[in-house]
Amino acid sequence: MTEQIHARLLPIFNQVIQRNAGEGEFHQAVKEVLVSLGRVVSKHPEYAEQGLIERLCEPERQIIFRVPWIDDEGKVHINRGFRVQFNSALGPYKGGLRFHPSVNVGIIKFLGFEQTFKNALTGMPIGGGKGGSDFNPRGRSDHEIMRFCQSFMMELHRHIGEYIDVPAGDIGVAGREIGYMFGQFKRLTNRYEAGVITGKGMLYGGSRARTEATGYGTVYFVERMLATRKLTLEGQRAVVSGSGNVAIYTIKKLTELGARVIACSDSNGHVVDEDGIDLALLQEIKEQRRERISHYAKARGGHVKYIEGGSIWQGPCTIAIPAATQNELHEQDAKELVKNGLIAVGEGANMPSTPEAIHVFQEAGILFAPAKAANAGGVATSALEMQQNASRDSWTFAETDARLATIMRGIHDLCFETAEEYGVPGDYLNGANIAGFIRVAEAMKALGVI
Ligand code: GLU
């Protein structure tokens, strides 16, 4: 049986469900945190006062807008745009934009809620927010992407700023889209305000290592977690789901550190390459050609298997990195992984394991790095980008990467120590939720009821 919500916090959860009807992912994210906070309010009841936890569950502001755009054939399309400004106790709202047909207000709210805790864990001055659109970029021409981004920014520009809210990328939003959006922001405001958005190209205010940061950071976290059991990545057999930005740089760093990554995927299927994923080929297919993962198997030849549909988690591996999307790893997958010799999980995507899957990992004593902590390297490096923009500076790759590694070690140790302090040693999920909460809660207390 999974843990239940503390009686003191149950009315808060019931109100979240009532107010946000039908938003399953948001309920799931809130429930996980409230379960962890039971331990906090038993020890420190003052955190449950002044509506603090209620306020934390209610976004400060939610913006929903129409995004009209015209395709290459002259047809008008209407998408929906979102920005949920969740919490600004620690700094300006900060979080990515997701362009994917599955996007709705519940998805953006769950992501914004998670982001608030994740950003707190980095120790940097950033609040939490998230946005996006149900626009599907797949198969769209470059001009269509540009027109969409410009139309999206036509509304979003009223709500963002380097001291207000700083978007970045997420699924479906990378360098190209950030460039178009920043260009439109600059044109609309007549200001070269580089710190308004992160994930920018190097020629217009970007930071080195930002592209690599989420994947690299996840691996740095897993490496540190393995070290608590005197293990390393050398010789580990890894499976990484997804084949987007997070997956690609996770594969790169894992391989550099001596692991063999034998599988990755997209939403259609997965490839198994027992020789280890050929990174240059994967990057060419995904980043340049923008093709499906099935093309990897075709290009690589005979020994590589492409499996359409089905789960990537069915084969043996010691390290599992879900880096595709929310709720992609289910209870049955977790059981299979545990049976096949799994040692550690590092969540590269946001909320990729279902609560039932997490329960299986924890019962089996698997090292489990939850998304809020494990994938915080991306947003942490975004904060480093903001820092460089504010000081009109540009650091080397080595310096930025070294700062990222230090931040990830810090997050690991904070989660580890917090778990010990709250009587759940080795439980990084509770450690992350509690440590993130305490930082946000302390700032909220200091700022008064606002
Ligand atoms: N979308 C990323 C995340 O989930 C990065 C956000 C950012 O850099 O602001 O944390």
Image (cartoon, grey):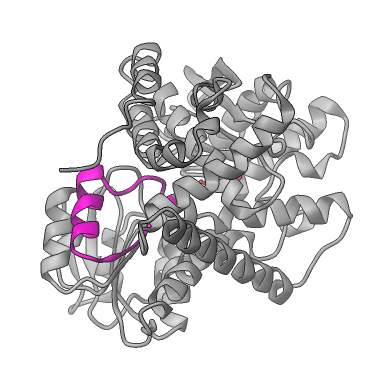
Q: Position of residue 365 (x, y in %)?
A: 23, 66
Image-quadrant location for residue 281:
bottom left
Location of residue 96 with respect to 293 vertically, above or below: above
Residue 392 in view, yes or no: yes
- Indicate the quadrant containing the N terminus: top left, top right, bottom left or bottom right: top left
At x 57%, y 51%, the residue is: 121
Q: Which residues are magenta?
A: 350-371
Q: Give the side of residue 258 with respect to residue 415, left or right.
A: left
Residue 119, given in percent of the width and then of the height, sits at: 59, 46
- Tell me which residue sits at (75%, 30%) in the image: 164
Instruction: Give the image location of residue 142, x and y in percent.
Output: 55, 41
Q: Is residue 386 magenta?
A: no
Looking at the figure, which quarter contains the C terminus? Answer: top right
- Closest to the observer: 33 or 257? 33
Q: Is residue 88 visible?
A: no
Left or right: where 241 falls relative to 118: left
Left of 137 or right of it: where is 384?
right
